[in-house]
Image (cartoon, rainbow, N blue to C red):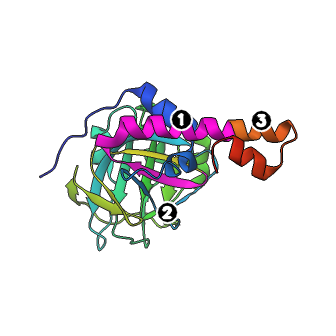
Amino acid sequence: MSQEPEPVDGTVLDRLQNCTAPAIADTKHEGVQVVSGDIEPVHTDCAFAGTARTVTLDPSSLWAPAQTLDTAREDEIVVVDADDCVDEAVWGELLSEYAVRNGVRAVVTNGAVRDVAGMRDAGFPAFARAVTPRGPSGRDVIDRNVEVTIGDASIDPGDVLVGDETGVVVIDRDALDEVTSAAEDVAEKEREVERLIDEGATLEQALRDGGIM
């Protein structure tokens, strides 16, 4: 049964985005999944954190998920499961511009996207399995607000996704508070290691005294 994602406080999302995806992955929390590396950012302006709104498309008849985007709320991420089909793009410039106007933070898909320059100019983060100039030819979606699998990660509506140039991580909604605190602790330790190195410590010493080793 589909479920409407519950919103997350935007300040929590900003805290996570400031931690980076690697810091969140380094918490090694059981509530964190790493999306496989074949789901890549299509341009460099790609840092985001937001709540998943999912949609499943028919890979034999792909379609731009306009209805899903119309229902998406501020601070959400549109997550498009195209069953790894990259023959046609499911997202492009027009959807990106509309998403930006409505406060949607990013799109993540195991399908293809297009209009990379337009998405970059709009400052809209997009992660995809491929890029193609060919647009979608279908008309329907299979389901919305259901569990999907993107890059070997299972994503439920309402899970929190964080991405940057190194990739995307998925945080189970029930683990959000624990993971946020743990990621901030990891980030603080990394900053301490950098400070120690700047003061002349060896790498091994800095890692040990900074609490990473």
Q: Earlier in the sequence, mark 3 or mark 2?
A: 2
Q: Is 119 on the left-hand or right-hand side of 180? A: right
The magenta segment: 165-191
Label drawn at residue 195: 3
Say if residue 97 shows up in the picture.
no
Q: Looking at the image, which residue is at 33% across and 69% down?
A: 83
Q: Nearer the viewer, residue 45 or 162?
A: 162
State the CA–CA distance, disc 2 to disc 1: 25 Å
Q: Which residue is mark 1?
A: 184
Whole-percent x, y for residue 116 in the image: 58, 54
Q: Looking at the image, which residue is at 26% across and 67% down?
A: 58
Q: How many neighbours does mark 2 have within 10 angstroms: few (below 14), some (14-19), or many (20 or more)?
A: many
Is residue 175 highlighted in magenta? Answer: yes
From this view, report whether residue 139 is shown above or below residue 172. Answer: below
State the CA–CA distance, disc 3 to disc 2: 33 Å
Q: How many neighbours does mark 1 have within 10 angstroms: few (below 14), some (14-19), or many (20 or more)?
A: some
Q: Nearer the viewer, residue 179 or 133?
A: 179
Whole-percent x, y for residue 208 in the image: 69, 47
Quarter residue 18 falls in? top right
Q: Is 27 on the left-hand or right-hand side of 210? A: left
From this view, report whether residue 71 is shown above or below residue 117. Answer: above
